Amino acid sequence: MNCLNIIPRIIDVGKKAQMIAYNSKLEVIGETVDDAIKDVLKRKNIDDFYQGTPDLNPLTLEAQKTIAYEIINQVEDPSWILIPMGSGELLVSLWKGFYELQNAKVIKNVPKLVGVQSQALSPIVDEFLRKDKIERKNQGIQKSLALGILVKNPLYKDLAIKCIRESEGTVIAIPEDKILNSIDKLIRHEGIFAEPASALTIAAIQSLNEKNSFDINEKIVCLITGSGLKAPYVLEAISSQTKTTGKGSIIITKLKILSLISISSIKGISGTKIQEIMGTISLAAIYQHLKELESKGLISRKKEGKNVLYFITESGKKVLDALDVLITLI
């Protein structure tokens, strides 16, 4: 099957790398998911494609609502459900699941739903709290780790707010500096390696608890929606925390390249593909980094036709394995 992914410029490098590894054709449209969706809806040949975008495919809502069933199977009478929000469609899905369970008399009450966003971009939170529209307009998009939920104009904003209010829940926007701390806590205490876009639900617990939002006997469920095993994106997190300049930034770039080679370890990856994924660095610089990584024995090369493909070595794998330890020390 041929696959086309229409993606925004602001996307996790690890996700983009996996699309390329599976030979998907990529089209980069706009800055955020909103821009890409708007472009898709304007296309004359839209009926020629299967619509995989969760926001636009009702089957996704039906699938995601079953998360509510799983929660009820595992947690008796949960009081609060904390859900990361981008477009808001995931929260609406869970509300639908809990509402149906209530109608079927499986549960007495729908849990209070909490929509969580990053302070870098939080249109649903702002609307819920009725922040001044001029303030929201001038907010723009700040640098964020939680790329998976950066949505400027959420399609499900109004419906998500309605669901939150009906469940007597609330919303909260989390500062970026608390997101990495949440990732670290999940790794240390639960053995769960989460992506920033979902780990912020853990930060939300602490913030809401400081406001005395919870009773002592209430059961709280945090939804973790994505894995942090996309190594390049974890390196972005490390990069944002380091205060080192010069050699520090060069090391981070080398580690990103090494991670991309690791993802494509079976087929190998060319220098041009690496440059295509990273985008912000020249091809000449890419090949210089590859030369230095090869000299250290971290990667190897193989010529196939006109292409030179790079593969990670056992030494290179050990370097990446050490990153898991490094993450917990930052």
Image: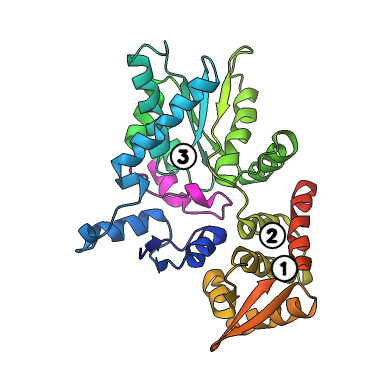
Question: Is residue 27 found inside the magenta-colored segment of the image?
Answer: no
Q: Which mark is residue 239?
A: 2
**Secondary structure type for disc 3:** loop
Task: Give the residue number, with chain letter if any, for mark 3.
Answer: 85
Question: Is residue 148 found inside the magenta-colored segment of the image?
Answer: yes
**Secondary structure type for disc 2:** helix
Distance between the alpha carbons at the discs numbered 3 and 1: 31 Å
Distance between the alpha carbons at the discs numbered 2 and 3: 25 Å
Mark 3 vs 1, N-terminal side: 3
- Kind of residue sitting beneath label 1: Ser
Q: Quadrant of residue 45?
A: bottom left
Q: Position of residue 132 (x, y in %)?
A: 41, 39
Q: Position of residue 192 (x, y in %)?
A: 66, 39
- Kind of residue sitting beneath label 2: Ser
Residues rendered magenta in the picture: 133-156
Seen at 67% across and 42% down, the residue is: 183
Query: Is 34 situated left or right of 253 in this image?
Result: left
